[in-house]
Amino acid sequence: MKELTALGHTATAFELLPVIGGVYAKSYDNTYLTTSSLLTAFSDYSQGCEDKPKFWSDVEYLEYLNGYADKYGLKKNIHLKTQVEKVKKCYKSNKWIVTVKHNRGTPTIKPHRCYATPPPEDPNEPETVYTFDCLAIATGTNNFASLPKFEGQDNYKGKLIHTEEYKNAEVFKGQTVLLVGAGESGSDICNEISKFATKVGMVCRGKHGHLIPRTQSDGRVTDLNTNRCRYSNPYVFGDWIGWTNQLAKRWIASMGPQTDENKILKKIGEYNMEQGTSAFSKFGCKNAGFVEAVVTRGAELFRTNFRLEADRAVFTDGSTFQCDVVLACTGYKNIFPPLEHSHPEIAAFGQNPRLLFKQIFVPEWEGEVAFFGFSRPAFGSVPPTVEMQSRLYAQIVSGLIKLPSACEMEKIALRDKENWEFRFGYDAARVKGLVDFQVYCDDLAGMMGALPPLRKIFFEKPKLWFKIMFGPFTMHQYRLVGPYANPEVAAKVYEKQPVGDLLECSITLCFLVTAKILSLLGFSMFNPNYF
């Protein structure tokens, strides 16, 4: 909305909840983001705390989003407590007809601590119809629970719930709990429940995400190392970089005093090396919650499939785990009810965003229909990724950038799809929007003419170059040149931002320099990513 209104367009948003914030306005108690304030913030709204990065709680992040909306006057165009009923293209008027119901309440809107319980809704509330030139779909990917049918589930006498129903860990006091799924929410919830439950088990039926803790041993946020120096390295070096870093950090953790923190860091290294993953080829699990539960509270990790019996899970290796509760941390599925009947072909793109041009645009509609937030960085953050998508979208709607033909967009989307599926392998089939944070954002920036001129900056402003290369990968680098650049503000932010830790930056720099030399010698497979 901000990018569109900045270019003179009228933008209207419909939100079912009584407050802005999406998934963070309906999250479980004690929710903390898995990316730091530096990596999560937008490049055009600073709270002035870049020198003191932290992990926002859901409440703090909602405060940030409200501050952003207030700064740019967006709230007057957001219709809260509004349910979109139908979306249909009118070919006669060439407009999109959107039918909504305002003043939604319970039971449509569930009670939550982030807002007052809505009153019961009026069943006689009339429908309201709006018309628009373009359609932007930003519903998020965490609205409809994906709950698989487990083998033997009908024989299980305990309680089976999805994380959508999870609010806090206290209700599991004195119980034995088996969690299925080791993603970021599952990892956090496992750790929380282990503080109250009698016993906790965690099932990871494949490879868990590549683990990194939220903070380093010195207390600094770990995603300072999600930087351009690391991800400028070619994919072919990815696993080597991951292996070297894990080996070095595991050795340092083993050499220091055997505190719980060092034991956790050592175990993280063991788990990552055991499954042979790196940040280049695996989606990230950017917290060490379940590892903490294993190391400090005796939680059990199971890496095989299972079947349920009356009071337990039986694993394929013969081991068992008695459980009162099975908590499915099995994610969500993308469903678009307002489009399912009128435009199922558009809904299908949301279910497989790989087929979208740059995972944003429906080729057939050539800029009229776009999806936002369906690209998930393996390491990095969704909100700034959406910022880059929004900047590109606004310029295309304004006619400042022209999209390729529908046929060409389809070809490019398939080529990108092959690239991401090669890069992320198994995960790409499960998480269809998975992308490399730097490669993807650089791609969008290149289309806008906003790529930072690194060579020029290196010679003219070496301190700024150092911060861009070794500091956290923020979108401020795309405000240095190009449309809507604000280099003075960006430079001030970079002055305050800390950089990654010496060990990891040194390792990744050595690989990057090696890659550059090999590429100059003619070995194209070692070409760095924009370096």
Image (tube, rainbow, N blue to C red):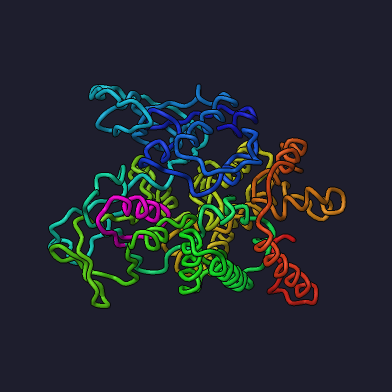
Q: Is residue 435 visible?
A: yes
Residue located at (48% from left, 71% from top): 270
* Left or right: where 353 falls relative to 471: left
Residue 501 figure quarter: bottom right
Residue 190 among magenta residues: yes
The N terminus lies in which quarter of the figure?
top right
User: Which of the pair 155/301 is nearer the observer?
Assistant: 301
Q: Is residue 136 above or below residue 81?
A: below
Q: Is residue 523 left or right of residue 7?
A: right
Q: Is residue 342 above or below residue 183?
A: above
Q: Looking at this view, name the residue that lies furthest to the right.
A: 460
Which residue is located at x 50 percent, y 40 percent? Answer: 56
Mark yes or no: residue 423 visible. Answer: no
Image coords of residue 333 (percent x, y): 36, 52
Region rendered in magenta: 180-201
Please state the horizontal and vertical placement of residue 122, each as a whole percent of the image.
Answer: 25, 22
